[in-house]
Amino acid sequence: MPLRGTGHGKLVGDVAPYFESLAELDQWASLPHEKLMAVLEYQARPQLAESLNQKGKLLVCHDYKGGYTESPSGLCYTFNFWPLCDTFVYFSHHRVTVPPSGWTSAAHRQGVKMLGTMWAPQSIIRQPSLHSPRSRIFEGSGEADCLQLIVGSPQAGAGPILRTDSVPISRHYASVLAELARQRGFDGYLLNFECPLRGGPEQARALAGWILLLRSELVTKVGPHAQAIWYDSVVLNGQLRWQDRLNSLNLPFFLSSDAFFTNYTWPPSFPALTAQYFMSLDPVLIGDDVKGSSISSVKSLQSIFTGVDVWGRGSHGGGGFGSYKAMTHIDPQSLGLSVALFGQAWTWESEQDKPGWNWDQWWEYERKLWIGPVDPQEVVPVPDAPRRPGEPGCPHDAFEPVSSFFVHAAPPDPTQFVFYTSFSPGVGRSWFVEGTNVLQTKDGWTDIDKQCSLGNLVWPRPSVIWESNDRPEPLPLASSMLDMNDAWNGGNTLKISVACAGSSADDALFRCIWLPVQSLNVTSQVSYDVHIVYKTVACEATDLDLGLFVKPLMAAGEDPPEINVGASTQSYLKNGWTRQVLSFSLPPGTTNTLIAVGLIIGFIAEDPSQPLDFSVSLGQLAVYPSSAAASVSKGTSGIMWAKFQSTNPITSPSSDLSGLLTWDIASSFPRLTLRAISSPEDPDPAWILDDTKERFPSFLYFNVYVNPHPLSGSVASATAAIFIGTTGLDGRANRFYVDSTILPKNVMDGRGLRFYVQGVSDKGDVLPWEMCAHVDCMFELRGC
């Protein structure tokens, strides 16, 4: 969350972000907890075609410096390749890892499942900038905790423990862990139990049975999409023996879980052996239960995530830019196995101590690993990977980025929740509200909750075509970059630069290109509204004409469906920004369709024989179901009231103020004009209310401001208030923690403070001040 100042206290973030022991987890479970209502719920992406469903998926396991390193007052690591990813695991060095709420919302916004992790602290000490040589999960005291996980939590003063011939299995921790996932809004767990079970096969079988209980509880409390993924570690006799593949020794754990994550030290022959072994399994073990009584999930080759360690540690290809060599053997496109990419933040940790390193250099390094270099002709050097003694050479083609191995997926249908993007990578150096810079930081900010799509059709490389397909000259050259010096709402724009050669054609005075920006799956017989906010800059003697438009995205050879696209309306905003809005729909009988939202850009050159260039800065894009008909009473969003509860009230000018700012949102109807009712038999209702999901306001976040109460005179207007931060870091709705670190020094010189809360709707609309709320905190009253 962008916050003014530095050195913010822990209260601005998640409460109990992780648990070091099962005892801590029990203590948490003993108290009531409300669900984090500001965390977006998971919505699945539209079902892919059968041919695409048979391709391997990508799981990203994020092990970065022990986790929980994000800061609201610095530029930190973020992940920005959600369209490639099916599942994201937030991994940290604690017994129970809870994904930060912002990471969960960022994943769900693009249809990706977010998992926590179960593990124990490592015994290996590492340097701050180095990655640990291996994660040891449930080490040391791990065996005792693993057994407690199965048998439950004994209570003081309880009677004798049930005595049976095998290990008894309790539902207790399965229920607690599922409730934790429900309350925090994430979707399950990676189970990484790297400790031997001295109870042997009996204890191993009990653990597999407990996993079934966990999955049952997750489905009940989180939903049918929830997952429990088993990491390749303990085998059926209880020994800790990494197999690097699926085989008979770890099969029982695979069958009990939703998916399997293999260790990453496998030789090149193992992925094919895994696929061969899987295909030999009895279909009854891995298929649907005809009676519907089984909670075992359907398994496929895509359920096997073959590990690749970006740090290299024994991973084929040596990790880093050699990771593609391992993925070539996994072959998600043809063989169909999935990939589990571990420690992808290698791009940050391995480089951060080098002289002159900064965020911009990391951004270039990161995108090179995932999508290739900016210049497609650049050759990416790949160091030779170390080989085991006696291991034969394994020749490979040139470097391939991670993106080349996976299907690029569009985000969830906007009928599920509004598609919105401010093209934010989740970091910035400033904060803008409707084109005005309200916060300039020294070291930047990070807020994963604000992360959006970067425009999957325009970043990293735009793909422009002539709007009129018969133009003979070469296409203009287009590039895109993040620009943190300007924004509409948020911390940056996506700036598209276009360079066009001169032309001697008779019709070159006016030329027109199609610039697709974002792909979306849409539903037939639903009308959608789309709006975009942008600004342009053109070279001298060049005029631009931009039009928002929607086109189908079809595979080669397919007939494009008809899309009903209305005329766009345009309005000019402050600080040089422009907004365009249009409506579109698929006609009845059309199947659900993948579409592209983009801009048709016409340019007129005074002298078309000369080269020209121009840029378009994209500030905001939103797509959502059209509003109810004019005859339907629709509510208007607003903030009903605000309250400030001081925890450290000001008693002198040198005192520190801290407290909790809370508010409530409301929807109000326009003034009612009651029509005449002709008789008791009149079939037309006096009014019709909007019964869609849009009937009550939903907000992306809230901006918070402050004004001082001067020693004499009245407080200034809201337009003069000073921005102090946004919501979003703690996952809780309608609250903001205030401490002295975010308050400008000059506001403490008066009689008190006035806090303002300004909502930003899920469509990116900033509420006018008359629909916002404020609350006064008067120092001499020691309260607010």
Image (tube, rainbow, N blue to C red):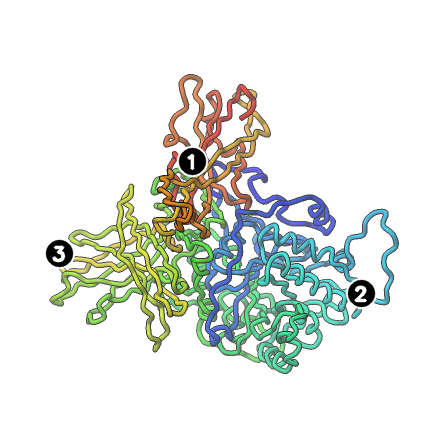
Q: Amino acid at mark 2?
A: Arg
Q: Is residue 524 above or below residue 671?
A: below
Which numbered disc covers residue 772? 1
Query: Which residue: 39% across, 42% down?
Result: 766
Total numbered circles: 3
User: Could you say where residue 31 lies in the image, as x and y percent from the top left?
Assistant: 69, 44
Which numbered disc covers residue 198? 2
Which numbered disc covers residue 606? 3
Residue at the limit of the structure toward the left, as seen here: 506
User: Could you say where residue 558 lies in the image, as x and y percent from the top left?
Assistant: 35, 76
Q: Few, some or many C-alpha atoms within 10 Å of disc 3 (few <14, some 14-19, many ≥20)? A: few
- Of the two numbered discs 2 and 3 on the same chain, state the one appearing first in sequence: 2
**Residue 59 in view of the camera:** yes
- Distance from the alpha carbon under mark 1 to that under mark 2: 62 Å
Query: Which residue: 52% across, 33% down?
Result: 741
171 vs 575, left or right, is: right
